[in-house]
Amino acid sequence: MHPTDFNYKMPAEWTAHERTFISWPVKDSMCHPDNHQSVCAGYQEFIKAIAEFEPVSVIVNPNELENVKELFNESNIELLPIEHNDAWLRDNGPTFIIDDEGNRAGVNWRFNAWGGKYAPWDLDDKVAPQILEHYNIKKFDAPLVMEGGSLHTDGEGTLLTTEECLLNPNRNPDLTREQIEAHLKQYLNIQKVIWLKNGLDGDETDGHVDNIACFAAPGKIIIQTCDDPNDANHKITLENLEILKNSTDAKGRKLEIIPINQPPRAEYKGERLTLSYLNFYFVNNGIILPTFGGNAAEADKMAEKVLSLTFPDRKVRTVDGMAVIKEGGNVHCTTQQMPYPKNLKAL
């Protein structure tokens, strides 16, 4: 049986959250372990910022529980001891779905560390079932390698993703595009997939969509753009823009497109950093926006302005996007939302 057989569907990220999940960094898995302390400080900032809007559950390795506990005294931050290899819960956590009566369930995708890039990942592949078991939430095991950062939905039947990631042979080499799309329809109850071409230049996730575009509302998409023709992102974003301009959603609507210009290029140890304002995260009545400072200060202000105008009823709360980006991701990558059941009143 599949979630669609019970009328479960994936709600949009802006749906009211009961809580946010986030995993605590693991030094042994880091690309740059010398930065462990500063990365942990970045996660601490993210968690405290999110906790201004909603409860946070922090997944912590049991041997670090006491140390991490000393960093937080907020009443709506809880620590959940679960063994894990790495700290990108967007990608190895459960995807929550809701049925017509407001009951929740979770999709447990298979996880292989972004195409086998970072071993070991056995503990990460077991995190989602443990979260669902802890909260006594029904589980659906999907026969598909999938990361939460590779998809966005509008809550009304349309899913946004990239060919670069989902069709990469390091994920599901035995499945065709049509078969992958069929699985997404069975497990998320969407009716249409909009396939963008590629993600940002240098993105080691193989083009996660949460760095380049997301729904702002049904029929409305925000996309990060690039004005520099000498930047590889210029061609990438122009191609994705053209796809969106010629697309309709599951309801047949033409898409309204809102551009946010990318921050200036930045590198660390000769590698391009995947700086993205689109890696923001919806929280209850707010948005957590990574900003980058320095020569990105003006771009930061413009991104904050665009989001403030797009979401006038939400507070835009900025955090230091440089704190964790050297590890390959940002705020959205670290988080996973648990929506309220519809039969409970949202705060």
Image: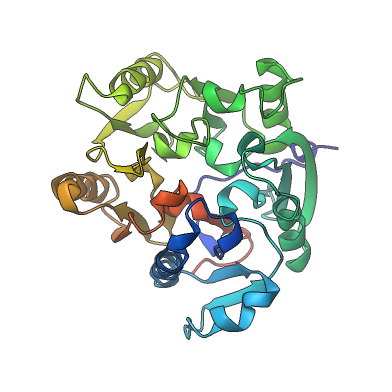
Q: Quadrant of residue 28?
A: bottom right
Q: Is 113 in front, or is 126?
A: 113
Q: Is 102 in front, or is 294?
A: 294
Q: Quadrant of residue 215?
A: top left
In this picture, residue 272 sits left or right of residue 156: left
In this picture, residue 20 sits left or right of residue 288: right
- Residue 151 visible? The answer is no
Is 115 rendered above or below residue 290? Answer: above
Q: How is the image coloured?
A: rainbow
In this picture, residue 256 sits left or right of residue 153: left
Residue at horizontal 73%, vertical 31%?
186
Residue at horizontal 69%, vertical 40%?
112
Q: Residue 227: x and y, percent?
A: 20, 25
In this picture, residue 203 sits left or right of residue 27: left
Q: Residue 53: x and y, percent?
A: 41, 69
Is 201 rendered above or below residue 101? Answer: above
Q: Is 158 in front, or is 233?
A: 233
Residue at horizontal 54%, vertical 31%?
159
How many numbered discs, if any?
A: 0
> Which quarter of the figure is the N terminus placed in?
top right
Residue at horizontal 66%, vertical 72%?
80
Q: Residue 37: x and y, percent?
A: 44, 69
Is 17 rendered above or below residue 260? Answer: below
Is 330 rendered above or below residue 76? Answer: above
Q: Residue 154: x and y, percent?
A: 49, 37
- Residue 140 visible? The answer is yes
